[in-house]
Every structure is written in structure tokens, then in C-alpha cells.
Image: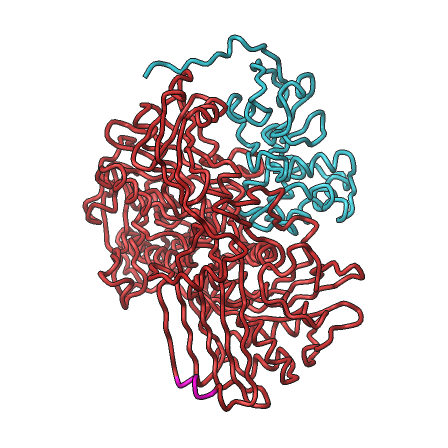
Chain colours: A cyan, B red
Amino acid sequence: MSAPTVSARTRPVVRLKVNGTEHAVALDPDRNLLYVLREELGLTGTKYGCGEGECGACKVMLDGVAVRACQTPVGEAVGHAITTIEGLARGEHLHPVQQAFIDAGAFQCGFCTPGMIIAAAALLARNPTPTDAEVRASLDGNLCRCGGYLRILDAVQRAAHSTVAGGTPTT
Amino acid sequence: MSTKALTVPFDLLPPTGRPYFDRFGDGLVVVLAAQRPGPSGWGAGGPPHGGAWIHLGEDGKARAFTGKVEVGQGTRTALSLVVAEELRLPLSSVELTMGDTDVCPWDMGTFGSRSMPDAAQHLRVTGTAARSLLSALGAARFGVPTSAVEAADGAIRVRGAASVPSVGYGELVRGLRRVEMVPSDTRPSPASEWTRAGHPARDVGAEDVVTGHRRYTSDLHPDGMLFGKIVYPPTYGAQLRHVDLAPARAIPGVVAIHEGDLVAVAAPTLPAALAAVKAVRTEWVSTPQPSEAEIVQYLRAHPAEGEDFWDVVHDESGSVEAEWATAPVSLRETYTSAYIVHGPMETHAVLAAWEGDRVTVWMGTQTPFRARDALSDALGVPPARVHIIVPPTGSGFGGKHAAQLAVAAARLAKAAGRPVRIAFSREEEFTQAYFRPMAVIDVRSAAATDGTLSAWEFHVLNAGSAAARPPYRIPNQRVDNQPTDSPLAQGSYRALAATANNFARESHMDELASRVSADPVAYRLRHLADDRLADVLRAVAAHAGWEPRPSAASGRSDGRGRGIAVGLEKGGRVATFAEVEVGADRRLEVVRLVSGYECGAIVHPSNLRNQVEGAAVMALGGALYEAVHFEAGRVLNPRFSQYRVPRFRDIPPIEVLLLDRPDLPSQGGGETPLIAVAPAIANAIFDATGRRLRSLPLTPDGIAP
């Protein structure tokens, strides 16, 4: 078979800043941010779960705010700092929420975990000491079919306390 | 270490004739012999299995192999722990390969809660035999009898010596290429002596999960890969009359095939593949399909012969018929449970790639060896030319047993000459996977005036026989399971029929207790024939602060109700307490769950706790609001926005009690903890309102009766 031909050359190219690195991607109305991150940039930590904004598996941060990548046209991400789960740790140091998920044993299959962590990290950035009710409300759009919700709540509170206490994240 | 491609999977070669050392380097290999399936099922020796094997390498590591797979239930760590335990190794020195059909033992599949009773036991025995062999090697090295040495921390050392000479496993096996079979009299360490298994452990690979580096099948994207899609009929049962692939093939880069019943496309991008699906011209002939409104009558009118788990069961002891006429108390009710979805967070995904005449398929599956056979049959190639690899999988819950996607991807990959990945969209996951079977259960009981049960008839339609037999002493019993010609595709599901059957039985027991003004806990304890289950029930009742009382007949003024239920299935014993609150607006809220579970010796306590909690959450959905709605061969609610699953807002406090029994064999923990949740909630709703709900889901719109 001959090489696949894609008519990308007719599309405008935009620049996306993902985890601090700039990437040139073609602007295509059929490709949302989730598809571009996963299939074009190889950042597969962000997951497809439903494609309709109901499950939260595809959450990434735009300028620190959690958004659903499956509902985000690429054009809307241009000019914003995109942070995916791969960009959350600082070198060897896990983000406090990442560490807390490990400490709390807050996952089973792990597929919803990146979206949960992004949503929780974004919440703690704007509200460092949320109540349980605030965590539940903030993460209600994130589904976990393994049923790890209570452990995830525990992990978010652990992360909140470690951050408030000034504890540095450890690995 | 050689990386040359294998031509024959290990399980298709005799145990001593496999190229272990070419593949994994020099060392010592210890093999537990397989037990192949008998001509008529499992036979007396328990379920068939491919055994286990462990390779001890010059690097001092133990590479263990099992045919079971990890789909999120935590068995990778649990099984690694038992290997670490028997070999006296740190967990980090154990590498477990699961479900890879080229190098793992044959296995029938990961279902039925068999990973702990079977795979863990096989790995323990194999690890024990390996430790003995290492001890013998060490003793020979030191010139002392084997009884004078012991294994500790990955080394053999002379017991009790002042300055302890020791030699590491890696050093002991240096230059060896030795294969030994596990002696049949090998006995693993008793659980009471465990120092690694049975103790808290961090899950293997946790860092990859939280950093997004764990690669699931749906994340794999080799160079040149095409995105595959299957063209599905518009309604269930529709037959393909005509297909024209030309318009799809006119799209640049698109490959389209029509082989047998399969119409499928592949393209360099997902949008192009979706465009190609739309471009394929098909004509279908629909056949009439029953709708949800008539499903109970339809199932009653369509008995079938059944197969596998859906075999016809007819158990009878004593004489039930005589009791109905004479017993002072009798009750007859029907309970139902809807078709529901597994809804794994990672939809079904496969990646197929051919190399010469051999195909490798990466797939999230619970049955890799069955998938190998299915591909072999469908593609007309010997099983040895099919290789299944099971990457980390975003949950299964019994829903990932099928191989149609793998066959489609392999055919597309062959036609395209490129790797092809197919992943279900969420809507396809809702419509093209299979469902937990609908259940219709007719229960008839007879009892003395004090409630003592004398007869019990339990007739299951369609769901299956799991947990259909009561754990209670009842002199006259009849238990039937009648498979049907289900109009919706149905299959395995976490705990399968046990959830519906337990719902029917434990609801019925509560109705009987209420009828004779008995306390629901005392009434069950009076009849329980299983001491272990009685222990769990007592523990949960005590923890929950159960106040003995007859079941309410007219509800409670404060709108708060409490219910309890038990279950015994797959060797596990569960009791669940539920407390509900019905507000002034009749909105139902589950405000507290207590689940007690006993499954013998606990191998991985933190994971078992995680499983019991997760099972309660999953069960909550099926108990309260999950149902597939369908009409004329179409699913009407194939989206998470239309099919409600438990979310953060729905989750009450869940208190888990684990009863460890190191004196008993380990059983599974992934399934049975689901089965007492729905009846406990139904019984609590009855306690709160005086109204008995006999259909799952109990409160689809969130409103109590």
C-alpha cells in the first residue's frame, strides 16, 4: 500500500504550548485538543472516556484551570499554557496530589486517575483547603468505575494538608 | 539476553522443551505442570490451568509467569507478593508476566474470582519448590546438609552461623540452564507465617499511573498505524443485504474490507476512519426485536438450551410441593433485575500487527488464550501464529471476554499491511459490547408460624445460577435456572447472576421476617447453615450498631431505614448493612454502608479493602439507577449523560470490615462483595417506608416509594 495521504497542508498551522514546550499542529475542526494531545503529540496520559464531557478522563489544565480536552477545540487552547498529567511533576518530584494518590492507594485500574489528579490539582490551586463537599462538587464530573471515590477524597485531603503544612513533595 | 522472535508459544511446547534461557537468560526454571481441561468440564481436580513457572536469573530476580491478567483488580501486586513470600525476596525483585500467550501458562481466563484460589496457589507452590532447589544449591556450595541452610532476602545462608556466610540467588544460578518440575508433594508456607504476603504493600507501577506514563492498549501508536472502525448494523439482529465499499475507498489512505459478516475500515486518522464509516453504503434487513416494556413476558416465552454459565440447572431435595398446601406461612414473589453495562473507563481496545505470517494483538482482555483460539479459528492460522499481549487495562468487570474487535483489527491489518488499532467509542461500548443479563426470579417459600422455613423454591430465568442456592437450612428445596433466548447480547459480569439472585433471596428473607415479626438479623442467623457467614453477619451487625427489631410494616416517621443482607459465593462470605434516608421530597439517599467480608487468608489487605469498597460503589449503581433502555433493537441511552452511574455525590461513607482467616485457603475478593448491597438497600427502603421494591434498579429517578 502506498503511504497514506493526508491533506494537512491545506490547513492552518497553530502553536500549542504543552507542558512548557511549543508544538506546531494543524488546525482541523475534526480534531479536538484530546485527539491532538494523544495521537499527534503522543501525550497519552490524558484519556478518552466518553467524548461528551461526562467522565472527566480527558481533563487537562489551561492556565491552571481544569478543562475537558474532548470538548476543547484546538483553537481555544492556542495562547494558553496547557498542562497535562505528564507535565505535573517537577522533575523527580511528584506533585503533592500525585504523591497523595499513591499514599492513599486511590486507584485500581488507574485509567481515570490522570483526569482526577488534574481536577484535584486545579482545585487545590484555587482553594488550598477545600471541604469534602467542595471536593465532591469539584470532582463530580469525573467518573471512576472501579469505585475509588472515597480514597480519591482521602487523597485530595492528604494533598491539601501536605501543601498547607508547607511540606515539600517527596518521591 | 536474546530478543529473537519466538516461533512457538511456550504453552504449546513440553515444559522441559521451551526456550526459557534463550529468552530470559541463564538460570534456574521451575515449572508447575499444567492441568488441562477434561473432556467433560473441570473434573475432580478443580478448574483446568496451565500451571505456573518461575525463572531465577543471574541478576537475582525472579521472573514469574501466570496466564491470569490484571485489568485493575490488583492481582499483579497480590500475585507478586506470594512469589516474594515463598522466595524470601523483596517485592522489587519479582517481575510478573501476565497473560502473554507466547510465554505464559495457558489459562482459561480471568473470571470467577479464580486468581487467588488458583493462580496464587500455583505461584506459591512453584515458589516454594524454587526455594528448595536454591537451598540445595546453596547447601552444596557450603558443603553442608540442606537442613543447615535457609533462604532470606534473596540469598541462601547457613542457619545460625556466627559470621553468616551467604550466597545470593543470582550467584547460585550463574551459568545454569536447568529446568525442574515442581514435586507433587510441595507445600507452600502457611499464611500464619507470612511476612510479605498478608501485609501492607504498595501497588506495583503506582508511579506510572499518577504520572500518566502507564500505557494502556488505547495508548499504543506504532509508526504507520491506522485507526480501524467497524460498520455496525442500525439495529440488533439486522442482516446485511448489500454493501458498497467504493465510496469509502475513494477517501485517501482508507482501507475497507468486507469479509463474512465483517464490514470495517481503517484510515490514517480517526476522523478519516469515521468519514469512511459514513461513506460505506450498506443495506440492512431488520428483524422484529422485543422492547423493554415487554421483556419479562418475552423471556418467559423464550426458554433456551443454554451453555457455559447459563446451563440449565434443576436441583431438588426433599419435597417442596407437599409444603405449599399445608404450611401456615407461605409467600410467592417475583424479583427482576435490568440489563446493565460494565462501563469500563477504558473502552474496548485492540492493536493488531502482522510480522510475516504471524499476528500480534495487544488487547485489554480477560481471556487472552481464548482470544488466541478465536483469532486462530477466524483467520484460519494455527494458534502458534497468534500472539496476544495484555497491556494494562482500564478495567473489565467481566465485560472484556470477546474477541471480535481483535479479529476485525487483524483482518484490517492484513489488508492494509500496517498495524491497526480499533477502540470503541463510548457509544459503541454501550451498544456493541454485551450486557449483564436481565433476571426474572420467581421465589416461593413456606414456613411454620414462627417463621422456620420448611420449603423454598427459587426459579431463575435468564440470569444464571450463581448464588441461586440458599445458604440457609431449609429441608425442602428446589432451585432452577432456565436460560432464555435473550434479545440483547449478554455475558459475563462482575459477580454475574449472584447479584440478582442474592437480591431476590435476601429480599424474600426480609419479607418473611417481617411477616412473622422477626428481627432480620436473628431470622437469618436462625437459618444460616454456614458458620463463617454467620460470623460475618454478626460482625457487621455489631459494627453497624444493629438494634434488633421486627421489620417495620408501616415505615418510620423519621424517614430513616436500616437493612441488612448476606451472601455466599465463590468461596467468599459477605454481609452488608445499609442505612437510607427518605427526605420530605421522597428523595432517597443512602447515608451509610457497612460491608464485612471474609475470603480466607488475606494476601494483599489494602487491595482487598479497595476491592470491597469499589464493589460497594459499583453495586450501588445497579441497585439504585442503572438500566439499559431499549426499543425495537436499539439502545435508547448509550451515553453516560443518559445512563447514570455512581458519582462522587452519590457515595455514602462505606465502612469495610475484613475478617482474616489465615487458617483457610485464600479466595477471591473482586466479585462477592457486590452481592449483598442491593438487598440491604431494598430492605432499608422497606424499613423506612413500609414499601417493598422488587425490581433493580430500585429508584431509577432517585425517588423512594
Residue B411 placement, left or right of B344 = left
Nearest the camera: A1 or A108?
A1
Using the rendered view, name the quadrant where residue B285 is placed: top left
Asked if residue B477 is positioned above or below residue B640 in the image, the reply reads below
- Is residue B483 toward the left or the right of residue A111 in the image? left
Q: How many marks?
A: 0
Residue B470: give x, y in percent of width and height: 47, 75
Q: Can the viewer see residue B572?
A: yes
Q: Is residue B188 above or below residue B408?
A: below
Placement of the N terminus of chain B among the 4 image quadrants: top left
Residue at horizontal 36 percent and vertical 24 percent from the top: B245
Residue B104 horizontal/vertical position (percent): 32, 46
Residue at the image point whose x is 45% and y is 71% from the top: B459
Q: Residue at x 48, y 62 (%)?
A: B297
Of residues B394 and B343, the one nearer the viewer is B343
Residue A119: % across, % down: 68, 37
Q: Residue B562 lies in what quarter of the image?
A: bottom right
Identify whether B389 is placed above or below A8. below
x then y, percent, for residue B2: 28, 32
Report the span colored magenta: B318-323
Q: Is residue B285 magenta?
A: no
Q: Is residue A98 visible?
A: no
Taking the image as shown, residue B601 lies to the left or right of residue B537, namely left
Q: Is residue B322 magenta?
A: yes
Q: Nearer the viewer, residue B268 or A161?
A: B268
Quadrant (top left/top right/bottom left/bottom right) for the C terminus of chain B = bottom right
